[in-house]
Amino acid sequence: MSQPDQTTGEALWRGEREPRIAILVLGCLLTIYDRCIRTIRATWGSQSRDHVDIFYVYGGQHANTDEEMVDIERLIGRPRPQLQDYEVWVSGDIILCGAADLYDAQQDCVLRKRLIAFDYLVNQQRYDFIYTVCATSYVNIDALQQYASSLPPSGVYHGPLGIHESSGYPFVSGASILLSRDIAADLANSAEAIITTNTIAMPDDVAIGHWVASKYCAESEAEISGRIATGKKATNNQTFVLPYGKGMIDFVMSPAYSHIPQEQAYHYHFHSRRTWEMENFHRRFFAA
């Protein structure tokens, strides 16, 4: 397979319309992540942009079992809906999925939440790109739009690259995955197969990477992982691509004075227990 010319993608989008992007934030009812999401809502999540919508996904099955969990009822402002496996309930920007919210109740719940939400966003709402991030993310939406507009409309699986330690499978980190509609739709439509075949309980991002590598890449997974390990271009198509040659900007352990935006970057990763650092970052560089 040959590498698509990104300028072709840019010309297509610019010539017709801007791509519609759904940013999917992986929610969790634990209070620490509830604080993270409230911080997102107060910072970059409060900024309205044409052609971009933000959603927060949670597991809607099983009663809250941890005293450190917020009530779904408080979150959605009504009694909990009764959801069967793979069902979805949406109100505004909240997506409840037919899955549990915590690993203790369902080991693959994060994978299920993502795939069920993909189905709603691409098959029902027809977004062109799905950008799924963790709850400790700061997204520069303008930079994300600029990047997505430079891409072809199909075959895209971009983000920080990794290699799963035990299986050796290549994957894009679940903290920052950009998917074109066709791949997101295929993942959603294949959800039961992906979940059923994930017998070794791989993390959600690794399971997604395994599916993409086996279906969309001419290269073997071993070859892709070898290329990632040596810093080479991972594939000859638009899968396993590191945006702008770098991954997410990692501020998790770095001192606050070093939290400065970088040119072209659209994703910054913060510490879940220091949400004020995200607030300060927003106020200093993006609030205006």
Image (cartoon, grey):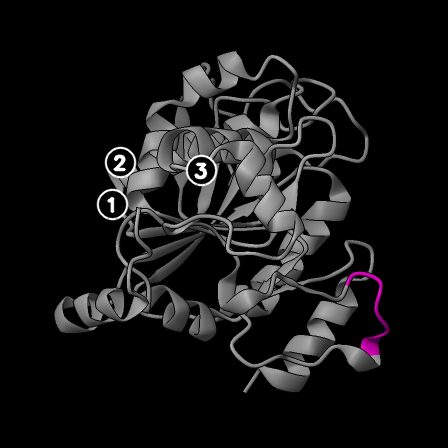
Give the vertical position of 125 relative to 141 (above or below).
above
Residue underneath mark 1: 126
Main SS of the magenta part reads: loop
Mark 3 and mark 1 lie on one chain; the one further toward the N terminus is: 1
Tell whether 197 sits left or right of 181: right
Question: Residue drawn at (50%, 12%), measured in percent from left and top?
Answer: 196
Tell whether 70 sits left or right of 219: right
- Residue 174 appears in the rendering: no
Mark 3 secondary-structure assignment: loop
Residue underneath mark 3: 219
Look at label 2 and name its amino acid: Asn
Look at label 3 and name its amino acid: Glu
- Quarter of the image for residue 30 reads top right
Mark 2 secondary-structure assignment: helix
- Quarter of the image for residue 68 reads top right
Look at label 1 and name its amino acid: Arg
Quadrant occupied by the C terminus? bottom right
Q: Percent x, y for residue 35?
A: 72, 53
Q: How many marks?
A: 3
Question: How many neighbours does mark 3 have within 10 angstroms: few (below 14), some (14-19), or many (20 or more)?
Answer: some
The reply to whether callout 1 and callout 2 are in contact (CB within 8 Å) is yes
Mark 1 secondary-structure assignment: loop
The reply to whether callout 2 and callout 3 are in contact (CB within 8 Å) is no
Give the vertical position of 162 relative to 256 (above or below).
above
Tell whether 3 sits left or right of 109: left
Mark 2 and mark 3 lie on one chain; the one further toward the N terminus is: 2
Q: Tell me where the magenta segment starts and ends, as one range.
A: 252-256
**Residue 123, label in figure:** 2
Which is more foreground, mark 2 or mark 3? 3
Q: Percent x, y for residue 63?
A: 65, 20
